[in-house]
Image (cartoon, helix red, strand yellow):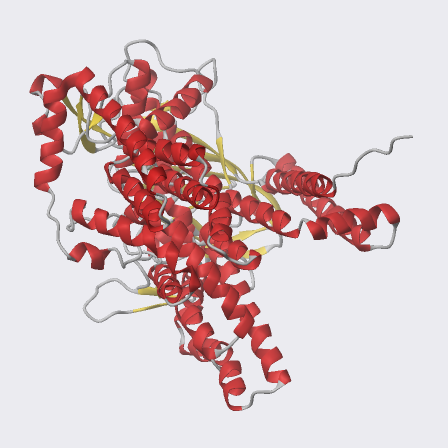
Amino acid sequence: MIEPRMNPDRDVRRTVFMTLLVVAAFVLALVVLGRPATGLPGYYGVRDAGAGVVPLLVDERGRPVPRIDPRIDFPFPQRLDAVYIYNWDIPRLGFPESMPPYAIAWRGVLRVPESGVHGFQLVARGEAQVRIDGRTLESLPGAAAERHLDAGLHPIEIDYAVTEGDARLRLLWRPPGEKKMQPVPGRYLGADADAFVRERTRAWSRTALVLLAIAAAIALVLPGSRRSVLAGRLLSGGPRLALGLILLLAALLRFHDYALVPFHHETADEYQHAWEGWNLLHEGTPASWSAFPDRYPQERVREFRWFGDPYALVWPYFDHPPLFSVLVGLVASIGAALRGGMPAGGPGYLLCTLPMMRLVPIALSLLGVVLVHRLARAYGAPERAALLGALCYATMPILVLGHRLVKAENLLAVLLMGAILLVERHKRTGRTADAVLAGLLCGLALWTKATGVAVIAIVVALMAAARRYRGAALASAIAAGIGLLYLGYAWLYDWSTFTAVIHAQATTKWASLDSFLDLLAGKVVVKPFGRGWYLFLLLAAAYAALRRPRALLVPVAIYVMILAMTADFRVVYGWYRLPIAPFLCIAAGFYLHEMLEKADLYRVFPFAATAVVTGLLYAFAIDPIATASVPGSARPVTISVAQTQAAVVLFSLFAIGPYLLRLVHDRDWTRRLARGVTWGLLAVFVVTCVSSVGGLVEIYARTSGLR
């Protein structure tokens, strides 16, 4: 009898894969069950010239369809604006030259948990009115209206209208026994009585699902032949399982409110890529808005305003190479087809909406998480260091936001990492196929972004440093050949316009050494954000320069040099940093790995004073505790727990105290204490990053850097 051949590694991979599928299904079920059944149905509409209201959301028969809003809490306009921008129907509602005048009516019931006098306040910019039990709630500016309500359900109606300016609407209440006004929680608002029954059912289902997961985890560690085998395989595949969980976390963070933050039109470049790809795929000619409309023939320039912002559509469009744009246009086309498309003759490219467009950079960034781990291992990182680097790449909010932007740098980062992995393999094996593939990725980088030339320079430099001159020459030749195809693409459409645009890009930008300094600041677009997180990444890079993984700084140095020579120093956008972010995160992985091993003041303090402090500031900014006046400013600023002296003292005790104690009294117990606190600070860093992403709409709108 021939016994079957065993493949332990394959069994481990299969077990890890199935476990990740189960975990992903569990998380997906929690997300679905976590969507509240409560909340008020809102009928969104647009006021027409005759003072009537045209519904924004309709079904196939043209009947108004409500949208469930968990809370009536819109302190910033982005959430309300997004409903109109992403659901606008041009054939039915006309071309939106400006933001439409809002007309929203919420109808439902308010569940009062206990009888007593309730205070209500309606904070609104525009016209707003609330009726409870059919009686209008008289709410004066800055004061609460009181109403005695019995426990139970009460009909509630809210009407809101604004014709110009930013929308703002908040329904606050103060239940009996409370002193502070707060937004009415969604669990007390519903379409009808059945909504609260459904919410209770979902709550029980969530609890049962969590208990089932806990029971499964306990059963896994109990004695038993099959369970022991399964547990052993999971332990053997620990790094794969950890990377899979990091990847799942990265996906959850990137998809949370992904269509809202960064804000619509914070950079119009997102639409620039989508429109180019759409028109190239559907019309056969690249067309998009241009920053250099004067360099295009005037008969090929169409100026218009869309939701209040001016655009100059040009064709054939040459501001950017088309590869990334084609990917975005393809995904946007699929999304438009699923929504039913647009009648012939309409501006189809306006069907490209951020919820569909941003799927492309998010997918690329998730691939990037895996590549960061593999690249870290290629640079000689221990498994834990590689996983920590991937964790930074997956969770740091400044990167999460950048990975949502529809910008070609997200594709360029993936191409750069892939090319370097091929170079590393070519250095070990000398295989020609690796050099060919590296050259192919270099050529695709040229079709992605002008700064893709940096990928070629990096590949050639790394191969030459390893004395792989033949591979460097081969990769360069292939990249050059693919680059010539791009020139053929330009010649096919309009060579003279192409050269005019390239000349404008080369002569109107102002290069300066200031570009290097600007690259040191944390940004997503142009707004300072996450400076402490980015500062930690730079400190980690400096650390890497003094240690064995210094080779990972070669791509950083070459890319930054080429970027500084080609970028306009007056506007150095945040997304310019995305191609170097993987290498900074790998350096952070090395740093954190050694920090956890040594657990001393010299390594912990720089991390705590930058990354941990930033996370705490942003996470606590979601729930301010007071307001304070600022000299020279007419508007008060909100103060969070993290902005108090008590928080500084408490943080200092944990971030410095154990390490000073170990410094002056180095014993086993002080070392164990220091290691425990170090792991705790790492956990705080991860938790605050996740928490900050959870409240990004409010944080991003309220804060400017760490003001």
Q: Nearer the viewer, residue 380 or 431?
A: 431
Q: Residue furthest bottom?
A: 664
At 49% across and 56% down in the image, what residue appears? 380
Relative to 297, say whether 146 is above or below: below
Q: Nearer the viewer, residue 426 or 334?
A: 426
Q: Nearer the viewer, residue 177 or 550?
A: 550
At 12% across and 30% down in the image, what residue appears? 501
* Rendered-image quadrant of the N terminus: top right
Q: Residue furthest top?
A: 344
Q: Is residue 119 visible?
A: no
Q: Residue 178 in the image: state x and y as whole percent.
A: 53, 63
Is 220 displayed left or right of 609 in the figure? right
Q: Nearer the viewer, residue 687 or 292?
A: 292
Q: Residue 151 in the image: state x and y as whole percent.
A: 62, 50
Q: Residue 375 in the image: state x and y as whole percent.
A: 47, 48
Q: Is residue 612 visible?
A: yes
Relative to 299, say whether 632 is above or below: below
At 45% across and 51% down in the image, what residue appears? 393
Res. 647 image quadrant: bottom left
Q: Residue furthest right?
A: 1
Relative to 290, say whether 419 is above or below: below
Q: Residue 318 in the image: state x and y as whole percent.
A: 19, 27
